[in-house]
Image (cartoon, grey):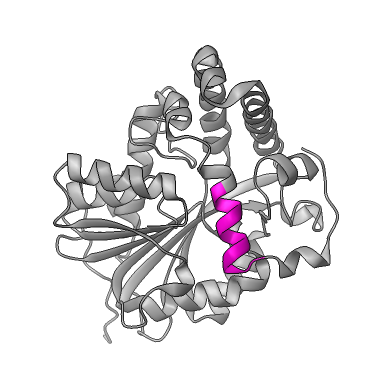
Amino acid sequence: MVRKQFAPWRLLSHSRRIDAEAIRYHYDVSNEFYQLWLDREMVYSCAYFKTGQEDIHTAQEQKLDHICRKLMLRSGERLLDIGCGWGALARWAAKHYGVTATGITLSRNQYDYARERIQREGLQDRCQVLLCDYRDLPEDARYDKIASVGMVEHVGRKNFPVYFGVAHRHLAAGGLILNHGISTSESNDGAHALGGGDFIERYVFPHGETPQLSLVLSEMGHQHLEVTDVESLRPHYSQTLRLWVSRLEARRSEALALVGEKRYRIWLIYMAACAHAFEQGWVSVYQVLAGRDDEGIQPLPWTREHVYQHGASTEPARTRWP
């Protein structure tokens, strides 16, 4: 991964139009192409491994459930998934946790796929996907829980106050938000802070930015979101990328027919390079759980047992005077 120096002009390049073009460039390649090597739920973000021996299907289901358990989703709650991809988290949460889920994306291909699959799985009464910029959500929309997985890298540092401000505004009282995103190492002094290098900027993720974790936490705090938990999944992403590379290589002939030699080789190089970057610690990925800081003590249990043990108490901690 080529190290890239700070480029001030890139902080100005996240208008609605440019963001939509960047998303379409990467995600609207071909649904069939992504289906060749993603898992059966079509999750295009870091998986979650418990042993390291899981296949991609199991690991991605574990990731979806990991997020739902961190958010303590309950039947009847309203969930917003910002940057929902092909709708996997929204479908999973509606199907397994009984929530009413709304996902938003700027990709027409993802939107069409998600809507078709929601219909096919009979989830249309409690799951929907909108073709919508996060800045254009209805002002009066409120959600009990918000998830943002692999989205913050597309926002741009300049727009962090707007992005996390939107999250705070649409989060209901007592609600929780989970932000899952790639961050550059704090020790790189900005070398990776504005993307993954010239190759990825030009051929893979135009206008992508990978900020330092400290900046994400700081901006969340400035927008009145109290961070309550941070988890690094760095080794999980390296393993995920290696599985993706192996699966794409195994479907080479089909990939070539769908997207051609150039695109096929670009995706292999980018994913292999990213796997190496995660292994070296140049970049990492963090799940950050937060709630509104104007609601007193967050409605969380005393421990994290509810994330890892089925049946563990999710009763919120309440302090009492002796």
Residue at screen point 33% across, 49% down: 89
Quadrant of the rendered image containing residue 119: top left
Quarter of the figure that contains the N terminus: top right
Question: Per the image, is 177 magenta?
Answer: no
**How many numbered circles does the render carry?**
0
Q: Is residue 64 above or below residue 37?
A: below
Q: Is residue 50 above or below residue 166?
A: above
Quarter of the figure that contains the C terminus: bottom left
Position of 237 with respect to 291 (left or right) is right
Position of 315 with respect to 84 (left or right) is left
Q: Is residue 97 above or below residue 259?
A: below
Position of 311 with respect to 319 (left or right) is left
- What predominant SS class does the magenta segment belong to? helix
Depth order, front residue of 300/184: 184
Depth order, front residue of 158/56: 158
For this orientation, the residue located farthest to the right is: 5
Q: What stretch is highlighted in magenta?
A: 14-24
Percent of width and height locating residue 320: 26, 83
The answer to whether residue 311 is seen in the rendering is no
Depth order, front residue of 166/178: 166
Percent of width and height locating residue 94: 21, 52
Percent of width and height locating residue 174: 30, 77
The answer to whether residue 184 is seen in the rendering is yes
Residue at screen point 36% across, 51% down: 67
Percent of width and height locating residue 35: 41, 29
Position of 297 with respect to 252 (left or right) is left
Q: Is residue 113 above or below residue 38?
A: below
Residue at screen point 23% across, 61% down: 314
